[in-house]
Image: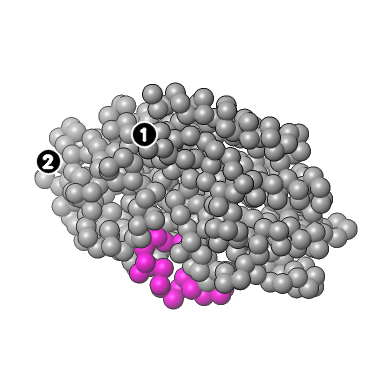
Amino acid sequence: MRRRGLPALAVAVTTALALMLAGCSADGDSGASEDGVIRLSFQSLAWQKESVDANKQLVREWNAAHPDIQVDYVQGSWDNVHDQLLTSFEGGEAPDIIHDASDDLADFAYGGYLADLRKLLPGRLTRDIPRNSWQATTFGDGVYGVPFLQEPKVLIANTRILESSGVRIPTPEHPWSWPEFRQVTEKLTKKGTYGVAWPLKEPVSVTLNLGLSAGGKLFHRGDDGKVTVRFGEGDQVMPGTVRDQVNTDGSAARQALGMGGSDALPGFFGGRYAMVPLGFSYRQQVAEQAPEGFEWTVLPAPAGSGGLAQGVSPQTLSIAQDSPHKEEAMRFVDFLLRPANMVRLARGDWMLPTGTEALADPALRTEENGWATGTALARALKPAPAQSVRGYPEWKDKVATPALQEYYSGAIGTEELKRRLVEDGNRVLARYQR
C-alpha cells in the first residue's frame, strides 16, 4: 500500500542526500571501509512512528551483534519511491537493501536493477513464507523481493449503528455476499447516515483486488506469455455493486468517491458513514483518532464465488543488482524477518506478516482492534492481479483510473467501462509486449 509521507520535493532532497552519505566509503563502491568493515545501506519506507522505531531498533540490534557488517538506515518515502529508485539505479547510487511493494518491482526486475534472490535465500525464509506470497515477487524465472508485510481490505464499522440495525454481523467464516452487502448498506442508510463510504480517490487497486472475491481477474496471460485485458462477469460484481450503491440506492456517499482513506474518517467518527472499506493498517488511525466512547469493529470484506479471496501487494525487501555485498545484505534481511522480528514490524505497521510462524503469534490473534479478523483472512490473500503486468502503471494512470472514476460517479455505463478497459487498455499493454 502506498503511504502518505513528507512532501515529494522534500523527500526527494532528503533521500538523495541520505543516499549520497550512505554510499560514501573509503573504498569507493566496494562498501567496505579502511578497517575492513562492510557498510550496507538499507532504505526503509516505514512512516508511522511505531514502524520507524521498530525498524531503527532492529538495525541497532544488528549493528551491535555484527561489528564487521554495519547497516546504515536511510529514510525513504512511499510518495516518490519509484522515481527515486529509478534515478538511484541509473546513477549507480541505489541502496543495497530496498524496501518497496511488490506491485512496484516488475519494471525494476525486468530492467536488471534488482538481484535474483533464488541462490541467496535461506531455506528457513523460503519455507516460512507461503507460495502465494512468493508469487507476488516472482517475475519471469527469478525472485526479486522477499514479501514480508501484507494488508487486506476490511470493513471498519460503527458498532452501535450496526447492532441497532438488526442486520446479520458477518464473520470470516460467514461473510456477507456482495448482494447481501448491498442490502445491508440500504438498511443502514438513515437520515444523516449513509450505509457505506467508498474512498476511491485511487480506484484501480481496490477494484482489482476486491474483484478476486467474485472471480474477477481482468488480466489474462496467453500461451505466448502476453497479457491481455478481458472484462467478464466476475469483474463486474464489485464495481457494479459500488456504482449501484452510489447511483441507484443512495446508500453510499457520493462525496467519498474522491477521498483517500484518511479523508473519510471524520465522517465515520461523526456517524455520517456506518461503514468504511479500508486497508487493515487504518485501524491505527481509528484507534488513535476516534472520539472517546466511539465503538468500532472490524469485519471481513464481502465474498463471492472466489470466497474471501482478495489481492494484495505485499511490502518487500529486495537487494540491488549492483550491490557488491549481496550475501551480507541477505543475512541482514534474514535477521530482519525472523519470526519474532516480523511480528514487531507487523505490529509497528498494523499490518499482517506473511510468515506462517509470525502469523501464529498470539499477539496478532487478539480480538482487540480487530487483529483476529485480519489473521483469519490471511489464508485467502493472493497476489494482486496486476503484479507482473508490464505497462500496468500506464494502463492504470491513463486508462483505468479515469474510466473507473467516471463509472463510479454514474457518468458512463458498464459497456463503456468495458470498452475503455479492454480496447484502450490492450493498446497500452501491447506496446510493452512486442
Position in image of residue 294 (x %, y %) = 72, 68
Up-down relation of residue 401 to residue 383 (above or below): above
Asked whether 152 or 20 is in front, the reply is 152
Residue 255, position as x, y percentages in the image: 76, 44
SS at mark 2 in the image = loop
Residue 272 seen in render: no
Using the image, tell me which numbered label, if any, was put on residue 376.
Answer: none
Residue 364 is inside the magenta segment: yes
Most extreme residue toward the front is 223
x 42%, y 56%: residue: 149
Q: Nearer the viewer, residue 133 or 325?
A: 133
Residue that badge 1 annotates: 224
Type of the residue with mark 1:
Asp
Q: Are marks 1 and 2 in contact (CB under 8 Å)?
A: no
Q: Is residue 103 left or right of residue 417?
A: left
Mark 2 residue type: Glu
The image quarter containing residue 355 is: bottom left
Please state which of residues 141 and 57 is positioned toward the viewer in this rendering.
Answer: 141
Snapshot quadrant of residue 133: bottom left
Name of the residue lying farthest toward the right: 191
Classify residue 140 as left or right of residue 233. Answer: left
Residue span colored magenta: 352-369
- The residue that mark 2 highlights is 34
Seen in the picture, residue 394 relative to 239 is either above or below; the reply is above
